[in-house]
Image (cartoon, rainbow, N blue to C red):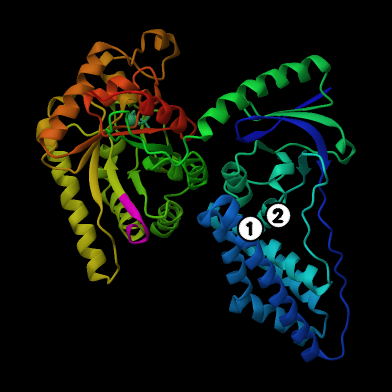
């Protein structure tokens, strides 16, 4: 037995034989041709075939993983119509007098390299898409069909890398897991793997000799076992059985409303940290996104993310959620989340220090850049904005003043934006105690129980020594939650919880009975909580 560690894209266990998947390596030779116009016409014809294939793939993906995820094939078709891409192919054919295959391969490589060098993660990930469309056209030029058949038995597909089109063409019923050496968690392949609910590992050094061998993929800790010992195999078979029984029961809840036996509705949303997480939100059928921790965008960069970089991310999330509510929290750095380029001074007590909204109200331009990006993205979906670490009414009034300035500037610039609900996180005891006053200022409250517990109990949430007494069930915390709900409702605010306590199934009934309007949890907790809500009575 051999054991390898990689990065897991989706939790879950898969057991089966490995299929080593190697692309039809497209051998493209440079050939001189006499009639360049005939060659450009050959290219046009192949392009039309490729676009037709993409149309069929779109329909297949639409049926299997929904419109939003199928969009990638529309995007690929659009990329093939791109003027720069086509001009490059025509120029190479005409100027160098070479075959269309070579012109397409060169164009694909050049464009992919250009995308790969861009700083923005989203654009970087597009390099794979350009390669994918180029290979498709070359396939059409060479008269090869794109066939993702996997054979009779379900398999664990092991590959160097997988393009989105290859992923979706694979027969889902024959697919147990993906293991790749390359690939990023932002790629559409990873998104598709999550959406298809298929365990996937990336970053594993793969070997062709594995083909046909038995293997176990443990997506919970990112381990691949090749040729597992019989005892390991038996253990995983048992665990898989349990996992499947639990999953099976939950699947029936997809599409079901989050409503108690006596008809009381609760909004059940999901928490995300990046665009890539949206697939899990959709796969788990959350009704919206209750917390997008935007600071991860800042943490993964070595520079302040530009307005445009942020806009692209927020817009993508809003579009992928197709009109469902997306609550984006403004930058919440400081404490455990340090960002080098902010050059923050060392603090004795960073959890109570220069962090979150305090930084934004101090570095107004950083704040305004984010607000502009958020408002611009609001034209593409249903975006709400919430602000972290609030302690006073004055702060909220100041935020609202800045928001108005940003909106006025956008209007002056002729940029459209949508209706945006404004809310605040209730995660300090101060905010709890003045929640009646705060409710008059905003549209909603989202209770951040992680920090609220830390500040209420005076226990640093980062300190492992205090872990055993960090008790989010503490009566003080629960009373605060109740108080916030009551004050919020009196002031016409809806109230939710987006801290980890929201996913604590032992408290779901209590929260719903308190009158909580929304729970936002990690995507994989959505269906278990839906089950709980649907089994309880409100009164
Ligand atoms: C919280 O404090 O409960 C919360 C949701 O925010 P974070 O965990 O990101 O601090
Ligand atoms: Mg917090």
> Mark 2–mark 1 contact, CB under 8 Å?
yes
- Magenta stretch: give its range: 378-383
Q: What residue is at 36 percent from the left and 8 percent from the top?
A: 469
Q: Is residue 443 left or right of residue 158?
A: left
Q: Is residue 398 left or right of residue 70?
A: left
Residue 169, label in figure: 2
Q: What residue is at 83 percent from the left and 46 percent from the top?
A: 151
Secondary structure state at the residue bearing disc 2: helix
Q: Is residue 192 left or right of residue 529?
A: right
Secondary structure state at the residue bearing disc 1: helix
Ligand 2 sits in quadrant: top left
Q: Which residue is mark 1?
A: 60
Residue 179, label in figure: none
- Give the Cα separation between the discs numbered 2 and 1: 8 Å
Q: Residues within 10 Å of mark 2 (few under 14, many from 20)?
A: some
**Residue 136 spot, x, y in % from top left:** 74, 66
**Residue 422 spot, x, y in % from top left:** 23, 46
């Amino acid at each position: 037995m051999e054991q390898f560690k990689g990065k897991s894209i989706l939790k879950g266990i898969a057991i089966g034989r490995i299929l080593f998947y190697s692309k039809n390596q497209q051998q493209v030779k440079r050939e001189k041709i006499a009639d360049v116009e005939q060659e450009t016409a050959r290219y046009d014809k192949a392009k039309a075939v490729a676009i037709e294939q993409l149309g069929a793939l779109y329909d297949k993906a639409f049926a299997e993983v929904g419109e939003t995820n199928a969009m990638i094939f529309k995007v690929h078709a659009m990329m093939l119509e791109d003027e720069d891409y086509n001009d490059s192919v025509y120029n190479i054919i005409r100027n160098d007098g070479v075959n269309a295959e070579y012109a397409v391969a060169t164009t694909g490589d050049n464009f992919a390299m250009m995308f790969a060098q861009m700083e923005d993660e989203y654009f970087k990930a597009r390099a794979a898409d350009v390669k994918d469309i180029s290979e498709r056209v070359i396939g059409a030029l060479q008269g090869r069909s794109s066939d993702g058949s996997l054979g009779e038995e379900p398999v664990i597909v092991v590959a160097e890398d997988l393009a989105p089109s290859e992923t979706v063409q694979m027969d889902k019923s024959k697919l147990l897991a993906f293991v790749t050496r390359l690939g990023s968690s932002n790629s559409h392949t990873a998104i598709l793997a999550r959406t298809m609910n298929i365990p996937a590992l990336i970053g594993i050094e793969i070997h062709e000799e594995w083909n046909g061998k038995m293997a176990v993929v443990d997506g919970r800790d990112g381990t691949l076992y090749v040729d597992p010992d019989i005892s390991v195999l038996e253990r995983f078979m048992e665990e898989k059985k349990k996992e499947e029984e639990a999953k099976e029961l939950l699947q029936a809840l997809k599409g079901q409303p989050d409503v108690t036996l006596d008809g009381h509705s609760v909004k059940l949303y999901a928490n995300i940290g990046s665009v890539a997480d949206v697939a899990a939100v959709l796969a788990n059928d959350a009704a919206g996104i209750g917390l997008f921790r935007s600071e991860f965008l800042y943490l993964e960069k070595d520079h302040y993310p530009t307005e445009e970089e942020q806009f692209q991310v927020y817009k993508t999330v809003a579009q992928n959620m197709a009109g469902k509510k997306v609550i984006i929290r403004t930058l919440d750095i400081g404490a455990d989340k340090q960002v080098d380029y902010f050059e923050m001074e060392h603090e004795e007590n960073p959890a109570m220090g220069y962090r979150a909204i305090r930084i934004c109200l101090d570095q107004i331009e950083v704040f305004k850049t984010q607000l502009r990006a958020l408002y611009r993205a609001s034209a593409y979906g249903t975006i709400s904005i919430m602000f972290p670490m609030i302690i006073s009414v004055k702060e909220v009034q100041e935020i609202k003043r800045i928001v108005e300035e940003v909106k006025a500037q956008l209007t002056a610039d002729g940029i459209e934006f949508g209706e945006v609900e404004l809310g605040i996180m209730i995660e300090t005891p101060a905010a709890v105690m003045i929640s009646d006053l705060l409710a008059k200022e905003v549209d909603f409250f989202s209770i951040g129980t992680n920090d609220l517990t830390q500040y209420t109990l005076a226990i640093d949430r980062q300190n492992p020594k205090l872990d055993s007494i960090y008790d989010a069930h503490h009566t003080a915390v629960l009373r605060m939650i109740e108080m916030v709900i009551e004050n919020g409702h009196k002031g016409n605010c809806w109230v939710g919880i987006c801290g980890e306590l929201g996913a604590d199934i032992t408290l779901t009934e209590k929260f719903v009975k308190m009158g909580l309007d929304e729970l936002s949890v990690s995507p994989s907790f959505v269906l278990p909580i839906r089950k709980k809500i649907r089994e309880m009575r409100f009164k």
